[in-house]
Image (cartoon, rainbow, N blue to C red):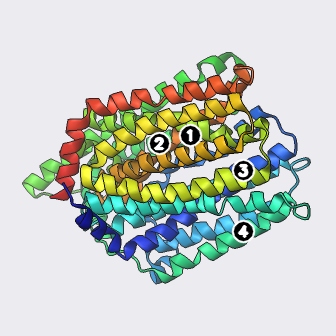
Amino acid sequence: MQTIKSTLQYFKNKKLLTIFFFGVASGFPWVMIGSAMTGWLKDEGLSRSSIGLFGLIFAMYSINFLWSPLADRLRIPLLTQKFGLRRSWIMSTQLLIVLCAFQLSFFSPENQLHLMALFGLFIAIAGATQDIAIDAYRIDILSDQNSEAMAAGSAMATSGWWTGYAGLGSIPFILVSRPEWQWHEVFIVLAVIMAVLMITAFVVSEPASNRAKVLDNIQQNFVNVLPNHTLASYKVVLIIPTIIATIVYGNIGYPGLPESLKDYRFALLTFTIVGLIALLIKQLISLNSQIAQQIERKTLSSTEPKRIHRLTAWLLTTMAAPIQEFFQRNGVRLALSILMFIFLFKLGEAYLGRMSIVFYREVGFSNEDIAYYSKLINWGTTIVFSLIGSVFTIRFGILKGLFIGGIAMSASNLLFAAMAMVGPNKALFAVTVFVDGFTSAWGSVAFVALLSVLCNKTFTASQYALMASLGTFGRVMLGSYSGIFVDWLDGNWAAFFVMTSLMVIPSLLFLYSIRKQLTRLIEQQQT
């Protein structure tokens, strides 16, 4: 067990300051398309269900793993050569967020709601892509250190995220509470703040990596084999884009699906994706077997590779190899168990988070109350307890941090139920926000640290995004239906929050069942 003195040594690392500022930039887009957008739409008189469904644009955060492999491979013209792979991706996405936020200031919810949703979608895509690059940057610069350093980095990332989301997120509510400010003017301010946050990417250094060489070797192995499997090449070129298109189709609401099939849409989508993945796995097993035989025999294909073979090799290396490596390293059963835990852990938070602003307003709190209590108190609490939680995680381990954080998150939701019964009591509001910030911070630090140590250094962007997107899936897709859930309960907020409290329990039971295997994986990372 670490001593307090040795634990605190991890926070002397200057790299943590960079992680903090990138965390701020990562959290800020959620203000634009989350709390600020929700407040704007609520003030314009939109219903709870409409506001909740508007949040479906956050689906980009849950499916960003689909394009995350590109952040490990694609070089952005001019920028990558000058600033490096990670920084060039961060700069590009941040610039897009600035431009879209500025454009939103020209729209009116009454007449241009669809355009607002479209540019909100653009911000979500850019923000989700920015997260891919920032998370990969954090893991890369700490990759030569142990899980304790990852926990310290997770604390700074969490503190930064909440500084961007809650600290800076209080600004739009403070401004709009003044009679001279309108919501469209507030979005100009948000665009300027995001532009200032871009400075970090220009002044930090790019982490060193031999990723390109490793990926080129993997790709060359596929190129050596594929000329003898031309049919397999065509299958892969068709299957991978089809899987991506199918997942996107489900996440954007199944457009054009006949009414007679709508009750079965999720089952149809699931079976389609599973079937396609099974076909892809079959091709991968066959190709990997051929690669192993050729390496063992030290032979090359006698057939010259064609363009289709090189394209297939690039697709397999970029899109399939990260997932394949994750399952091979951990084993199929444990890999699936890890992914299931990640999904379940954020389920209760999903329903609570999306409707919190609507709940505060319906209980009777003003925009100014929300700014000072929900945002500022939560911000300060999260920073303090992220650091305390990381100290605990470093001393006692990631899994104990997850257990304590999960139990605390479950219990804290009951305070929201008490608020629903008591009404607009500011003292209770402050206590609830304080406890919620403490529990979320504690759990998030351990959660992010776990995801970070589970990544292979060659595929940091791809694998972290895959795991993090599962955690975001509940918050986005299921959370988007939270307004409908409250309506189904006839506006009974107390019952709603009690049910969100119970949603955390299955994840903790699941974590307990795989604790020994996870402990071994974490210990292997430190050797």
Q: Which mark is residue 191?
A: 4
Q: Is residue 466 visible?
A: no
Which quarter of the figure has residue 192?
bottom right
* Residue, disc 3: 370
Tell me the amino acid under the disc marked 3: Ile
* Residue in view at x 44 percent, y 68 percent: 19
Mark 1: secondary structure:
helix
Q: Which mark is residue 471?
A: 2
Tell me the amino acid under the disc marked 1: Arg
* Residue in view at x 52 percent, y 50 percent: 64
Task: Give the CA distance from mark 3 to mark 4.
Answer: 21 Å
Mark 3: secondary structure:
helix
Give how far across and how far down residue 10 sits, in percent.
30, 68
Give how far across and how far down residue 137 sits, in percent.
41, 67
* Residue, disc 1: 475
Say which of 267 and 468 sits in front: 468
